Image (spheres, coloured by chain):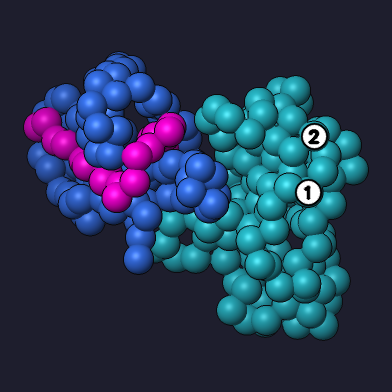
Chain colours: A cyan, B blue
Amino acid sequence: DTEVTQTPKHLVMGMTNKKSLKCEQHMGHRAMYWYKQKAKKPPELMFVYSYEKLSINESVPSRFSPECPNSSLLNLHLHALQPEDSALYLCASSRDREGPQHFGDGTRLSIL
Amino acid sequence: SQELEQSPQSLIVQEGKNLTINCTSSKTLYGLYWYKQKYGEGLIFLMMLQKGGEEKSHEKITAKLDEKKQQSSLHITASQPSHAGIYLCGADFRNYGQNFVFGPGTRLSVLP
């Protein structure tokens, strides 16, 4: 069982929909991450929050909008996605920007 | 170009055999992480190495970081079907103006 919880596990949405992915951790970690993983590829970093502030945005299109309401929660708001955005979206957290990241099981997103 | 390279790309071994996976960087590593991923799931943290020459073990898995801190190996002794999965090395390249990056992964199959 993972200590980082992601919901939903699966999401199918149309290109005009608006949806959100959620991530929660109760380990007291102050850094949280969003990754995108395509099939047979390693995860690619999208965003990093450190102490609830966005510290890294890896040139991600604006149709992905992250939000960190508090130190335990991380959201990824999705709007007007493209079929190529279909992927496994992974959330991770770490004690701070140093140290190992602990991953959730991901949300498998399919864009129709 | 890949900041981290892994070899082999894939590996099929008979249960009980030993195996080694390598991870190589063209830059000095300030922290090298090993993760395991089962298909479609999140990443499981295995080990973190920071010092040149460091070696860590957990159950039947041993990881080493070379003295130059540019290459790491992951060794599994007496492999079991439960060891099957994708092994990824990851490193933080913030000292080089980049961010956390994963290697391409090594897909391990263990035949019973």
Q: Nearer the viewer, residue A64 or B55?
A: B55
Kindly identify which residue carries mark 1.
Answer: A54
Q: Which residue is depicted at the point 82% across and 43% down? A: A53
Q: Which residue is depicted at the point 54% across and 52% down? A: B97
Q: Quadrant of residue B33?
A: top left
Q: Which mark is residue A86?
A: none
Amino acid beneath label 2: Tyr
Kindly identify which residue carries mark 2.
Answer: A51
Q: Quadrant of residue B51?
A: top left
Q: Nearer the viewer, residue B92 or A17?
A: B92
Classify the position of the N terminus of chain A by image quarter. Answer: top right
- Residue range (magenta): B17-36
Q: Which residue is depicted at the point 66% across and 67% down? A: A59
Tell me if B63 is positioned left or right of A72 in this view. Answer: left
Measured as percent of width and height from the top left, residue B62 is found at 25, 23
Q: Tell me the subunit letter for badge 2.
A: A
